[in-house]
Image (cartoon, coloured by chain):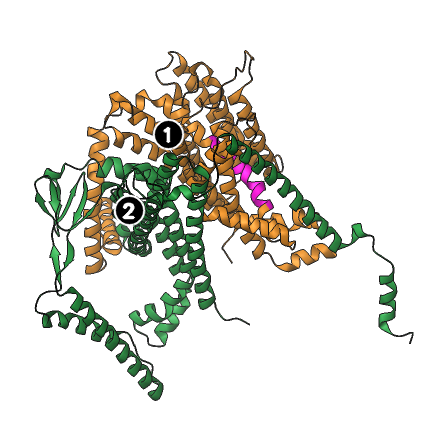
Amino acid sequence: MTNNPHSSLHKSEAIRIPFYRNVKMINLLLQLLFFLIIGILAFWLLRNMFSGLAQQNLKIQFGFMTEEAGFSISEGIEFSSKNSYWKAFQVGAVNTLYVSVLGILLSTVLGTLIGVGRLSHNFLINTLSTAYVEIVRNIPLLVQLFAWYHVVYLALPGIRQSIPLPGSIHLSNRGAFFPWWEGTDTTRMWFGFIGLAILSGIGVLTIMKRKERRSGLPQSKILLPLLVFSGVSLLSIFALPQYPLHLSSPRLKGFNFQGGIHFSPEFMGLLTGLTIYTAAFIAEIVRAGILAVHKGQGEAAQALGLTPLQIFRRVVFPQALRVIFPPLANQYLNLTKNSSLALVIGFADLFQVSQTISNQSGNAIPIILLIMGSYLSLSLFISTIINWFNTKTEIVTR
Amino acid sequence: MSSHTVSKNMMILWLRKNMFSSWRSALLSLGSLWLAYLILVPILVFVVHDANWEVIVDNIHLFAVGSYPADQLWRVFLNVVLLMGLIGGTVATQTTMGIKSASLFMLFTACALWIVIGGNGSDREGMNAINHYFLIAGLGLYLLGYTTTKKKAFSRAKVFGIGWLLYILLSLILLSGFTGNSFLPKVTNHLWGGLLLTLLVTVVGIAASFPFGIALALGRKSELPVIKLFCIGFIETIRGVPLITLLFMGQVLIPLFLPPALVVSNLVRVMIAVTLFAAAYMAEYIRGGLQALPIGQNEAAQALGLNRVQTNFLIILPQAIRAVIPALVGECIALFKDTSLVAIVGLLDLTGAAKAAIGQPNFIGLEAEVFMTIALVYWIFSYLMSIYSQNLERQLGVGIR
């Protein structure tokens, strides 16, 4: 009875702790205080805002977005001044995605090359890569964009004296003209064949997987399905009565180029600037990622008799990727956000178009909300991918 | 064999080892040599021969200090001189920085500051000589700061923390002055510009965002759900949008949020936006440091009877921040570069000055010269900071396990 260990506890609980020393109470009060301060501040700011807006006869609503835009956009999806503000916003958003995706692809390639170059034993390659990184990442992107646009792309010769580059690419102060494929009558049929090729590739893959499971011998499952896929899709070209794609090269006709694909100097300036700038950061990430893989890993793989290619593909690369991917995805996010600097060189991206809408309609606050919403959802999307990747590649520990 | 041929042989050996070790390496070497030739030669020819640097010389005042009145320039110069002393002392706290790097640092700093000091340009005769006195005084103060700190006369970290804060306050007072004062007449901040403004926005942004970032980081790690949610929302919202959005929000919303009687200048609005932006990033870095800290530190502090505030400020934060100092310096470099965006909302910082200069009718078509110059200026400052940060990293031993 008396040696019941709980009895003394009950006794001490009976002595009531004053509320100002009770941790739970303090926490609750602290939060309440914080909430009150923030609330009062927000209330004051918003009240000022609404009274100010009322004086200017403005309301926060999105109805104006369906009105006629009254300005035109030459970039991206076809858009005329008769279309609505909503449509303009969409055009800007698509342009942002377009330049971001291209920039991400190009900067990854360039950044990886330079990152590997920084690890090279070749003195010249090493020095040049280091110089590239140290010069590019220490100059503001804005200055670089200005320079690419004003000093490089706008300073190119006029359309009639355009600079031809190998592969019938033409550069002039009206932008870059690249050759591009155009569909013909048989394109649709060919797409059908490509679908067939994908199916047969998957078929081969499943057969190989089943075989692997039965025999227990691991083997590379990439090469053969890929071979089957490309074989079917390429051979089908010859089965068709006409080539499914026709390469159209830009040709000077009168005052402009016909055929091919055209990129405006604004687009080229933005893409070049973003690519060059982000590649410098990606190079550092790639370098750090490769250096982070312990030397012993490669040596151990060598001792096990793996070929150099196998060592890179099976041992070094997967481990480096674990280090590389999160900051790399962050750089992709940065590139996407940095594409908003398109404003300064007049490329019609999400931000620039929104800015125009804001000036045109006088509805600044709804536009700010829209811009923030768009960029936030992009960020959320990319960080979801990062988290998914992290959980997937996490080292399993105790 | 003469020493000449030996060194020649050494060179050939070196070349063979570092550039032509295999046919692939040789091919790469030749390829990159060709690439370097293609890029560097036109630039060199342009810089030496084709460029018209008059646009820089004529606008040096604009690039350095914007529209700061010429007869009040001594205030800027005095600021610069004090700054050099402070930098000298701070560099001396870097024990891993040898005397060679320190002098290199001084040279670079002097170069950078000479650009600011050159700010009177053709405005007033006789000022040039005074400028040189200022430059010499700056170098002297740098050395003084360096040597006295090297002698370990005082607890260094604290002194320099306080020193930098005092300097920021002093320089703001010195630059803006007082209305009606004959010695320090008021210079309204829309006249500030050029490199001066760039540095000012950076320094104020760093100083103001640091405590704010600490508070946000602690809030995000807090057990109190209301505070935690607020901090997460704040940090993620700001990190999710481009800085330029925040700058425009500052332009549009701050005047709306405040009562009509309270008018804030463009510079202040920009500084608020930059501070909020930098704080969110600082908070994430500091949070990284907090997470890296073993939980035992917290428990040990509690066992010793420290309360929450004491635990955070005496035990947790000093260790957490120390672990992420290199990342924080990296953030400072990023902030310095990001200040170029203030030109978009109409401030006349270094980039804004460049835009103004190429818009002048007598300097049409000189964009290359202007952008090259400001790129060089930005580069010098960023590179200095990155050297400093690499040194810090070595000194703190972060990353070496």
- For image coordinates 65% across by 56% down, the residue present is B297
Q: Determine whether A246 is above or below B263 in the image.
A: below
Looking at the image, which is closer to me, B181 or A377?
A: A377
| Label 2 Cα neighbours within 10 Å, binned few <14 / some 14-19 / many ≥20 | many
The residue drawn where x is 54% and y is 36% is A50
Res. A271 mark: 2
Q: Amino acid at mark 2?
A: Leu
Front residue (pair B124, A99): A99
Q: Quadrant of residue B129?
A: top left
Q: Which chain is orange?
A: B
Residue A305 falls left or right of residue A52: left
Give the drawing colour for chain A.
green
Q: Chain of mark 2?
A: A
The image position of residue A227, as x and y in percent, is 21, 74
Which residue is nearer to you in this view: A331 or B85? A331
Going by the numbered disc 1, the residue's amino acid type is Gly
Q: Which mark is residue B352?
A: 1
User: How far from the left and from the top, in percent, is residue A73?
Assistant: 27, 41
C-alpha span from label 2 to label 1: 23 Å
Q: Is residue A18 magenta?
A: no
Q: Which residues are magenta?
A: B200-215
Indicate whether A208 appears above or below A372. below
Q: Left or right: A373 with respect to A74?
A: right
**Chain holding disc 1:** B
Report the number of numbered marks.
2
